């Protein structure tokens, strides 16, 4: 790549991150509030499946004396997106420094909705991708030192989220299989630095949680999300549909909130239709301009990592969070397969960025997409009442972040059957009202659960209006049971 192009267009590596800094989401998830609360109050700083994320957030909070930890987490992730794009660019530039491919592919990865979504949120997925890319950068050195550094950074990524284990594993096996001179030795060089992972888990279990040092204890802590039921391996038709949608949504925002966002706005409808047409046209032109390289076995590594992540996502209910690294891996595959990336692909990436900003980041930043805050105020004002809410987990996480206490009286309907209601105790629910935005949780709900409320007589007491539609809160009490 010539110096003129590099200096003139390097801003493309900065643009997605800059947008994320300006447009952080104001509709944070329960996990985002939970991580921020733990860091804010110094509680549960080490979680098994993302061991260092909350602790590192806690550390930054004290270094810069931040008061709003939730915003701090979003800021950090946006900065790490800069790092991810720069590292991907450096990896690609090592092998293809004579054309526009490295900058175009790096820009594409940063414009994908998965990158933008999690770089504007206090979530755990952007940081480990950065360290995995650093490890991939060092891997290309093919020396003892480079393998040592590669293994260290890929293993270190696993300490920010366990899903990065697949990235570390496939590279290690690849070294063992294809290294012609002393493969076992180079594999050991790659693997030995990964001892930092079990070491960190041992230190956390023994010195932070003060548990006995034993294999069983370390094992159960490491995989506690499976032991406590927070993670499961299951496949059914609805999860399979969710999986397909999540793959599409990894690149382009695709959510029911879009229809509510554009309804009634001729301008947004015209923008949406124009972008769909333009995206289709430039995708076609990009594919038509493709010329392939000779098959390169390096692409097998990235394809295997993609396959394992997608398989794990499917088994985990189609979880889109396990696909955040896919755009970066896809770019590495494309780079191995295709000679030159055309200007049409660059235009497609620009259009993708426009779509994701207009229909993803803008509504998440400027609009209230869920009724959390109003229900939060009610739960805090009536601690003796019982609240059965569709968004109970989010409501509880917000209250925990704001007060430092986790409410006991707010729950989802599946938890209601285990709750003992006291005489004259009020009960509130929004399950009797259709949610305005029907997300995957709505479609996965077992509707027979709502029949648990049949013995109450409810009256409407409150509502929230989103996109011109109302979602209601109902009140019942034990005196009106029949």
Image (cartoon, helix red, strand yellow):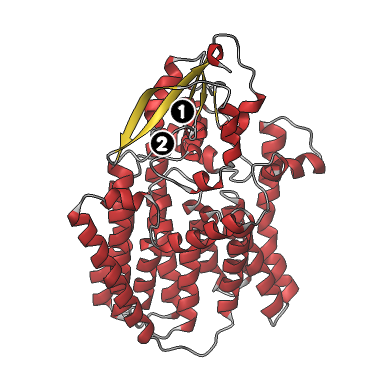
Q: Residue 296: percent from the left, percent from the top?
A: 55, 84
Q: Which residue is mark 2?
A: 70
When asked about the image quadrant of residue 104, the answer is bottom left
**SS class, disc 1:** helix
Residue drawn at the location 67% of the way across and 37% of the way down: 204
The relative height of residue 52 versus residue 408 in the rendered view (above or below) is below
Q: Does 430 sit above or below residue 129?
A: above
Q: Is residue 354 left or right of residue 475?
A: left
State the residue in front, 465 or 250. Answer: 465
- What residue does disc 1 label? 401
Q: Nearer the viewer, residue 431 or 211?
A: 431
Res 14 seen here: no
- Residue 144, picture quadrant: bottom right
Q: Position of residue 397 (x, y in %)?
A: 49, 31
Q: Are marks 1 and 2 in contact (CB under 8 Å)?
A: yes
Image: 378 above or below 349: above
| Residue at x 56% of width, y 72% of height | 302
Q: CA distance from mark 1 to mark 2?
A: 9 Å
Residue positioned most to the front: 482
């Amino acid at each position: 790549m010539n110096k003129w192009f590099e200096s003139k267009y390097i801003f493309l590596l900065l643009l997605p991150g800059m947008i994320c800094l300006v447009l952080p989401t104001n509709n944070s998830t329960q996990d985002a509030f939970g991580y921020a609360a733990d860091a804010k109050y110094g509680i549960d700083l080490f979680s098994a499946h993302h061991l260092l994320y909350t602790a590192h957030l806690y550390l930054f909070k004290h270094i810069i004396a931040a008061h709003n930890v939730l915003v701090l987490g979003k800021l950090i992730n946006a900065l790490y997106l800069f790092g991810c794009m720069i590292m991907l660019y450096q990896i690609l530039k090592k092998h293809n420094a004579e054309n526009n491919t490295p900058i175009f592919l790096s820009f594409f990865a940063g414009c994908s909705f998965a990158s933008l979504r999690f770089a504007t949120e206090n979530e755990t997925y952007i940081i480990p991708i950065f360290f995995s890319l650093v490890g991939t950068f060092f891997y290309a050195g093919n020396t003892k030192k480079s393998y040592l550094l590669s293994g260290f950074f890929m293993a270190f990524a696993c300490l920010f989220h366990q899903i990065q284990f697949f990235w570390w594993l496939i590279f290690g096996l690849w070294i063992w299989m294809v290294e012609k001179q002393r493969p076992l030795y180079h594999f050991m060089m790659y693997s030995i630095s990964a001892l930092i992972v079990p070491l960190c888990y041992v230190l956390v279990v023994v010195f932070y949680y003060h548990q006995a040092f034993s294999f069983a204890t370390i094992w159960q802590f490491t995989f506690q999300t499976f032991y406590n039921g927070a993670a499961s391996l299951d496949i059914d038709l609805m999860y399979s549909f969710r999986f397909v949608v999540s793959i599409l949504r990894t690149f382009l925002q695709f959510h029911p909130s879009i229809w509510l966002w554009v309804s009634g706005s001729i301008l947004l409808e015209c923008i949406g239709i124009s972008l769909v047409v333009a995206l289709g046209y430039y995708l076609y032109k990009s594919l038509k301009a493709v010329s392939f390289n000779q098959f390169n076995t390096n692409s097998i590594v990235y394809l295997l990592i993609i396959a394992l992540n997608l398989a794990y996502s499917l088994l985990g209910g189609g979880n889109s969070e396990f696909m955040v690294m896919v755009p970066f891996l896809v770019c590495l595959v494309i780079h191995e397969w295709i000679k030159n990336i055309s200007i049409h692909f660059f235009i497609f990436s620009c259009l993708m960025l426009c779509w994701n900003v207009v229909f993803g980041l803008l509504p998440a930043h400027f609009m209230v997409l869920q009724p959390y805050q109003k229900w939060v105020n009610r739960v805090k004002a009536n601690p003796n009442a019982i609240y059965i809410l569709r968004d109970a987990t989010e409501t509880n996480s917000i209250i925990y972040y704001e007060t430092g206490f986790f409410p006991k009286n707010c729950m989802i309907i599946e938890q209601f059957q285990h709750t003992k209601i006291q005489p004259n105790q009020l009960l509130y629910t929004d399950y009797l009202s259709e949610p305005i935005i029907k997300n995957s949780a709505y479609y996965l709900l077992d509707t027979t659960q709502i029949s648990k409320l049949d013995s109450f007589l409810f009256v409407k007491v409150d509502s929230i209006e989103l996109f011109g539609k109302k979602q209601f809160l109902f009140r019942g009490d034990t005196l009106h049971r029949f």
